[in-house]
């Protein structure tokens, strides 16, 4: 990236602020200070189309940009205290951090807990979430992932309708609240991952196209016009988003960015925007002497996403891998509609353990074509896997968790697969104690036509899964309230997760992420999977029975003096293993 301009409102002294906005097709832009006093200041336009002004106001001042007399919030706003349609606010730098010695954690140590701030606690705020951090640390979590917090309309939203990508949601506690949460996490040794959305902007409060060519009509996305990452003026569009990533890393001390749906970004340039993004974050991490990681959500099964720039890759440190989830879910539930088509055998899961993807070039019945490519790098730390996440629960028609879809034994089996895989495990909030409340899709738009369009869109999404009946109204407050965690714990569930995560930390063979240091044996007829993993002189045997019958099998790997590492009802005699239905066993040698 060649751009380096600071965007938005930047304090240069306690009572002096520099304002800068990109509006290349506007000859004149003014800034209107609306509080604490009323003031209008013309801005100076430079050759690149950036309009600039210095104004004698400090933190807390509220302002709008005037475009031919029409007042609009700042596209690079750092705070929207009155919502997406109100004035922007100057954010100060007076926050007192307590993480001076914090350098982040290695990606290989990530055990991720995904949460939605608004439904994680009764209060639904950043500050309220702090009260749960100690319990997460004791569980064995090392990284807390926040679903998007960029300012969205109203007070109820998953966060993917953000209109101001640099302004932490006002109803969650705004900029100061987010900083307090990050600071508290670091004091407990927890990294913070922030979900950011660079593939689209929310439809309500999105005035950015009035400032410049941020969008292109050459491509379409599920959300309308695509962002302009490869057309005329795209250098400055790219900088707008790269600037945002660097802001989260620098001003908020964020440890990793989970970049939403990179497959929805259309960019045919030789040096893609996403490559610019990961390179800029990596350079900023060096400048700050901190570990800052980039994680991609991608359904492409394309190893170029996680290949380094030097190998013509996008340079992400890791990606979410849906294939483990889809295979595991199909094995447990038997579902075969929608994107679960083509998954569901024990040998499918064995392939994911060995390669990171299931689809790596073979025909996908869901997609109707050959799909994916096998990664060359056997580093399992490049894949984030789960049994549940916000999408896989919330995009079901009724938002059911595995807790109400399968038996308690199957839930334990799913947790063992995720935790003992060679990948980075992710858990969705409440999973660790057996939450039964659904996580449903909710919004609080103010436009009646948009509200109805969202309802129609949800109805269309459910058709490919052949789900029928009434679905929760996204706009109803009851849908949001229903999705809030109850914190009604199932006895022993949390201790089960804690024990498995402890075993993962203590045994080198389980801690390893080397997909080449494992071998698998799958029996699809009996729905069995055996995995041997090793690291140095340490080795473990994992046995998973997804069937509904007790099964006895001969261990096909080299004989070893296996010793049970976790007490189950499994029994081993010599080289023969007896495994009850819907269960797992863990042995070490």
Image (cartoon, helix red, strand yellow):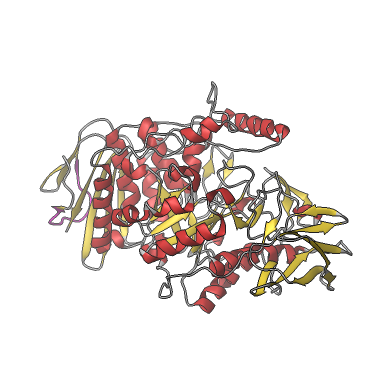
Q: Write down the quadrant of residue 28 in the picture.
A: bottom right
Quarter occupied by the C terminus: bottom left
Residue 537 vertical position relative to residue 159 in the rendered view, above or below: below
Please, which residue is most extreme toward the front here?
37
Residue 356 visible, this angle: no
Q: Nearer the viewer, residue 292 or 11?
A: 11
**Where is residue 354 shown, x and y percent of the image?**
38, 54
x 48%, y 49%: residue:
125
Question: In the picture provided, is 577 more to the left or to the right than 44?
Answer: left
**Where is residue 481 shown, x and y percent of the image?**
48, 34
**Where is residue 37 shown, x and y percent of the image?**
74, 61
Question: In the picture provided, is 177 more to the left or to the right than 431?
Answer: right
Q: Nearer the viewer, residue 479 or 324?
A: 479
x 26%, y 64%: residue:
508
Query: Which residues lie in the magenta part?
Result: 553-563
Tell whether position 439 is magenta: no
Q: Write down the quadrant of residue 464 in the picture.
A: top right
Please, which residue is most extreme toward the top here?
469
Residue 546 vertical position relative to residue 306 in the rendered view, above or below: above
Q: Write down the quadrant of residue 313 in the picture.
A: bottom right
Question: In the picture provided, is 233 more to the left or to the right than 28?
Answer: left
Tell whether position 562 is magenta: yes
Residue 454 vertical position relative to residue 223 in the rendered view, above or below: above
Residue 328 visible, this angle: yes
- How many numbered badges does the structure rendering display? 0
Q: Nearer the viewer, residue 204 or 128?
A: 128
**Where is residue 175 shown, x and y percent of the image?**
56, 59
Please, which residue is most extreme toward the left here?
573
Quarter occupied by the N terminus: bottom right
Q: Main secondary structure of the magenta part?
A: loop
Residue 573 vertical position relative to residue 246 in the rendered view, above or below: above
């Amino acid at each position: 990236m060649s751009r380096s301009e600071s965007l938005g409102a930047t304090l240069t002294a306690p009572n002096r602020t520099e304002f800068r906005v990109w509006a290349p097709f506007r000859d004149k832009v003014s800034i209107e200070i609306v509080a604490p006093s009323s003031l209008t200041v013309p801005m100076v336009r430079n050759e690149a189309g950036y309009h600039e002004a210095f104004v004698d106001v400090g933190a807390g001042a509220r302002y709008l940009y005037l475009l031919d007399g029409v007042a609009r919030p700042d596209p690079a706003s750092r705070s929207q205290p009155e919502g997406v349609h109100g004035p922007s606010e100057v954010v100060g730098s007076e926050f007192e951090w307590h993480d001076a010695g914090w350098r982040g954690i290695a990606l290989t140590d990530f055990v991720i807990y995904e949460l939605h701030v608004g439904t994680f606690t009764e209060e639904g705020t950043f500050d309220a979430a702090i009260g749960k951090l100690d319990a997460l640390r004791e569980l064995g979590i090392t990284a807390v992932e926040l679903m998007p917090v960029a300012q969205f309309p109203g007070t109820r939203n998953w966060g993917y309708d953000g209109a101001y990508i640099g302004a932490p949601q006002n109803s969650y506690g705004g900029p100061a609240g987010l900083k307090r949460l990050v600071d508290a996490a670091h004091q407990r040794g927890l990294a913070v991952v922030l979900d950011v959305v660079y593939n689209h902007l929310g439809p309500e409060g999105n005035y950015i196209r009035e400032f410049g060519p941020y969008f292109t009509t050459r491509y379409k996305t599920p959300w309308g016009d695509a962002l302009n990452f490869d057309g005329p003026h795209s250098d400055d569009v790219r900088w707008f988003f790269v600037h945002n990533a660097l802001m989260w890393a620098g001003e908020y001390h964020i440890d990793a960015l989970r970049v939403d749906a990179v497959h929805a970004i259309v960019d045919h340039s030789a040096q893609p925007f996403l490559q610019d993004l990961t390179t800029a974050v990596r350079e900023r991490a060096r400048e700050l002497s901190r570990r800052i990681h980039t994680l991609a959500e991608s359904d492409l099964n394309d190893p170029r996403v996680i290949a380094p720039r030097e190998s013509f890759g996008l340079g992400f440190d890791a990606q979410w891998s849906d294939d483990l989830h889809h295979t595991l879910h199909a094995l447990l539930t038997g579902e075969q509609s929608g994107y679960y088509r083509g998954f569901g055998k024990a040998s499918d899961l064995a392939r994911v353990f060995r390669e990171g993807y299931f689809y790596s070039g073979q025909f996908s019945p869901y997609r109707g074509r050959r799909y994916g490519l096998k990664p060359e790098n056997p580093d399992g730390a490049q894949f984030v896997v789960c049994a549940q996440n916000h999408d896989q629960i919330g995009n079901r028609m009724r938002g059911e968790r595995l807790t109400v879809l399968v038996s308690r034994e199957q839930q334990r089996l799913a947790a063992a697969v995720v935790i003992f895989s060679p990948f980075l495990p992710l858990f969705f909030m409440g999973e660790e104690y057996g939450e039964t409340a659904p996580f449903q899709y909710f919004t609080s738009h103010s436009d009646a036509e948009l509200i109805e369009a969202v309802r129609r869109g949800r109805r269309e999404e459910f058709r490919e899964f052949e789900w029928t009946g009434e679905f929760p109204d996204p706009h109803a407050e009851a849908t949001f309230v229903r999705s809030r965690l109850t914190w009604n714990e199932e006895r022993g569930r949390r201790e089960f997760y804690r024990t498995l995560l402890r075993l993962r930390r203590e045994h080198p063979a389980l801690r390893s992420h080397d997909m080449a240091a494992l071998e698998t044996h799958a029996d699809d007829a009996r729905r069995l999977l055996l995995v041997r993993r090793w690291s140095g002189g340490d080795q473990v045997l994992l046995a998973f029975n997804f069937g509904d019958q007790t099964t006895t099998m001969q261990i096909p790997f080299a004989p070893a003096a296996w010793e049970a590492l976790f007490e189950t009802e499994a029994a081993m005699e010599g080289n023969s293993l007896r495994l009850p239905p819907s269960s797992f066993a863990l042995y070490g040698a």
